[in-house]
Image: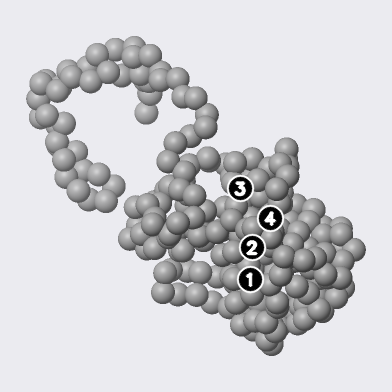
Amino acid sequence: MKKLTVCGVNIADFTIVIPAIPYPAEKTAAEFLQRVIEASCGVKLPVSDTKTAHSIVLGTRDTDPDIKWDGFRMRTDDSHLYLFGNEARGTLYAAYDFAEKVLGYRYFASDCEVIPTDGEADVPAHLDTVDNPVFELRRCSYISYTNPEFASYMRENCHDTTAEGRFGETRMESTIPVTPSPAIAQVTILKNIPNTSPCGRANVLREGTTFAVSRVSSA
């Protein structure tokens, strides 16, 4: 089995700690870490709402100004590992990131999960990293993304789900106000123009269609 130490302490000495009244996604993060650590390292960590001598602490009720949207922070002191975001979804992402970077965990498709069991890994004391998304809204129409668990692991946050927050709340609208670009021209199609999309689906720009142009490219 994989040998894992955190702050120089064997992973077997750790407890996974969540808030006394956790959000559903925080519970999912705890269950996920408990499962993959057991599969990789051969030890099932207890889950508690009470901090112990050595804890993996999930979630926070404070707001971290360095964290953007559903980003997250991974931090250690001399004895504990902290994984948290300003949103419960961010805390779940932090758990995924820990599993990927430390355990080598991979979830390639909704029916293909890999949990390595060999080698050694160490999470050093006084680690402090912040991971923020580039885009606030992220979505893909690939069929596997209809599985809310897999979509969550792939950091998609606009997927349709009835999972009741277990993988974070669905985000459908940006918090950033968007100002539409003003139209600079009106264009009318004079004759049918065949067009083939990158996926090979043919379509036609139809004669008589008029649309506004807000940006001009020389390409």
Give the Cα distance between marks 4 and 2.
10 Å
Q: Looking at the image, is mark 3 or mark 1 earlier in the sequence?
A: 1
Find disc 2 in the rendering and name its residue: 95
163 or 114, nearer to the observer: 163
Q: Tell me where residue 67 appears, x and y as whole percent.
A: 68, 42
Q: Tell me the quadrant of the picture where the N terminus can be found.
A: bottom right
Give the Cα distance between marks 2 and 1.
7 Å
Residue found 38% across the figure and 57% down from its top:
162
Give the Cα distance between marks 3 and 2.
13 Å
Question: Quick check: marks 2 and 1 in contact, CB under 8 Å?
Answer: yes
Question: Quick check: marks 3 and 2 in contact, CB under 8 Å?
Answer: no
Find disc 3 in the rendering and name its residue: 87
**Mark 4: which amino acid?**
Gly
Residue 182 as seen in the image, left or right of residue 2: left
The crowd level at tag 2 (other Cα within 10 Å; few <14, some 14-19, many 20+) is many
Give the Cα distance between marks 3 and 4.
8 Å
**Mark 3: which amino acid?**
Glu
Residue found 39% across the figure and 63% down from its top:
147
**Mark 2: which amino acid?**
Ala
Find disc 4 in the rendering and name its residue: 59
22 or 74, nearer to the observer: 22
Eye-nearest disc, 3 or 2: 3
